[in-house]
Amino acid sequence: MTRDESLTIVQMMLAHWRPKREWTKDEISAFATSIQDLSAELTTSAVAHAAKEIAYPPSIAELREYVRIERVRRMPQLKPLEPRSAPLPFWVKRWICARLLYERFGKERDERRFAEQGDFGDLTKGLMPDDAWIDEANSLGDKDAEKAFRAMTRKT
């Protein structure tokens, strides 16, 4: 969002949750800077939802959580699972290698986002290069990838 949009959102918060004391110009500026990387539309909506649920102004971390919830809420409904015979998309195999099976390949966990994820995930992370984790994903069969993914979902 732009600087003006972030300042408007902070003013919106201050108008809704009347603080016990006036915020200084520096406090307003710091808060606005801290949320400037977020979507203005999602953040505005998140503030509106937070206003219905909490009686105090949210911290930056709490506001970010409301934005995350708003992003998930707006995601289209998931389609039914495709038949098991459908192969995994190749980028998913790369994701599984980078996030779950990295030790198998003697590498560190790689948290960069894949372009195919869109804006889902940690937007502060850089994008995964197109040529990263290709060899590892090529060596991974669908059954191994499915097994690793199922093991991860059982942990959560």
Image (tube, rainbow, N blue to C red):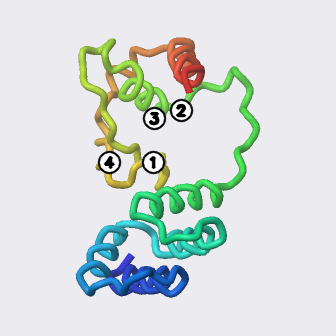
| Sequence-wise first label, 2 or 1 | 2
Disc 2 to disc 3: CB gap under 8 Å: yes
- Disc 3 marks which amino acid? Trp
Provide residue 9's location: percent of width, then percent of height.
45, 81
Residue holding disc 1:
121
Identity of the residue drawn at 38% across and 44% down? 113
Q: Quadrant of residue 94?
A: top left
Q: Dot 3: within a 10 Å radius of its alpha carbon, few (fewer than 14), some, or many (20 or more) residues? A: some
Disc marking residue 89: 2
Distance of label 1 from label 3 (alpha carbons) = 15 Å
- Disc 4 marks which amino acid? Leu
Residue holding disc 3:
91
Mark nearer the viewer, 2 or 4: 4
52 up-or-down from 133: above or below:
below
| Sequence-wise first label, 4 or 1 | 1
Residue holding disc 4:
127
Tell me the element at label 1: loop
- Disc 1 marks which amino acid? Gly
Q: Is residue 29 left or right of residue 147?
A: left
Tell me the element at label 2: loop
| Sequence-wise first label, 4 or 3 | 3
Q: Dot 4: within a 10 Å radius of its alpha carbon, few (fewer than 14), some, or many (20 or more) residues? A: some
Mark nearer the viewer, 1 or 3: 1
Provide residue 52's location: percent of width, then percent of height.
66, 71
Mark nearer the viewer, 4 or 3: 4
